[in-house]
Image (cartoon, rainbow, N blue to C red):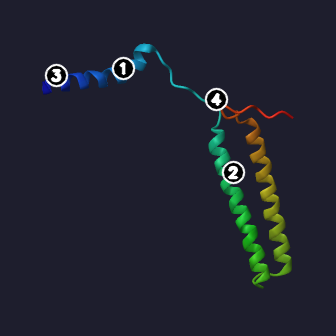
Amino acid sequence: MLLLAGILTTLAAVAFIVSPFARHVAAPLTDGPDLAAELRELMALKSVAYETLQDIEFDYHAGKIGALDYQEMTDRYTREAVDLMRRIEAIEGRLPAPRGEAPERR
């Protein structure tokens, strides 16, 4: 009885592994870069830019940096954050709508 259970389990495992080949099922392929991964990376960079802006603000008010440096760094990281937001919005516009949701009408 135990031998029969072992044989049936082995046959089921082999059938499960071989079935995609027998049915000629192809793996889904993607065209181009992984937009979701790129979006996650840009969101992380945006968070870093925002935190940096906060740190610059705190350092300026604590007297650790001068007004000229404060203005220069604030301008630089604000431009970076704006650029990241534009890139995020561009990628979000290219992502397909989640299933079950109607696409936005403009």
Where is residue 77 drawn, in percent x and y?
78, 63
User: Disc 1 residue type?
Assistant: Val
In front of the other: 99 or 35: 99
Q: CA distance from mark 4 to mark 2?
A: 20 Å
Image coordinates for residue 38, horizontal then vertical, percent = 66, 45
- Residue 59 relative to residue 75: left or right: left
Q: Earlier in the sequence, mark 3 or mark 4?
A: 3
User: Mark 4 vs mark 1: which is more N-terminal?
Assistant: 1
Q: Are marks 3 and 4 in contact (CB under 8 Å)?
A: no
Q: CA distance from mark 3 to mark 4?
A: 46 Å
Contact between labelled residues 1 and 3, with CB atoms less than 8 Å apart: no
Counting residues from the N terminus, which is met first, the one under dot 4 or under dot 2? 4
Which SS class for mark 3?
A: helix
Would you call the spot at circle 4 few (<14 residues within 10 Å), some (14-19), or many (20 or more)? few
According to the picture, the residue beneath numbered tag 1 turns out to be: 18
Q: Which residue type does callout 4 highlight?
A: Asp
The residue that disc 2 covers is 42
Compare marks 3 and 1 and give the one earlier in the sequence.
3
Question: Is 34 placed above or below 14 here?
Answer: below
Task: Please tell me how crowded label 3 is: few (under 14), some (14-19), or many (20+) other residues with Cα within 10 Å.
Answer: few
- Residue highlighted by disc 3: 4
Report which residue position mark 4 lands on: 31
Quadrant where the image shows the N terminus:
top left
Q: Report the label total.
A: 4
User: What is the x, y in percent for residue 97?
Assistant: 70, 34
Q: Residue at x 80, y 70 (%)?
A: 73
Asked whether the residues under the numbered discs 2 and 3 touch, taking CB atoms below 8 Å apart as contact, a structural biologist would say: no
Is 43 left or right of 76, judged from the image as shown?
Answer: left
* Mark 2 or mark 3, earlier in chain: 3
Q: Residues within 10 Å of mark 1 (few under 14, many from 20)?
A: few
Looking at the image, residue 29 sits to the left or right of residue 94; the answer is: left
At horizontal 74% and vertical 70% (from top left) the residue drawn is 54
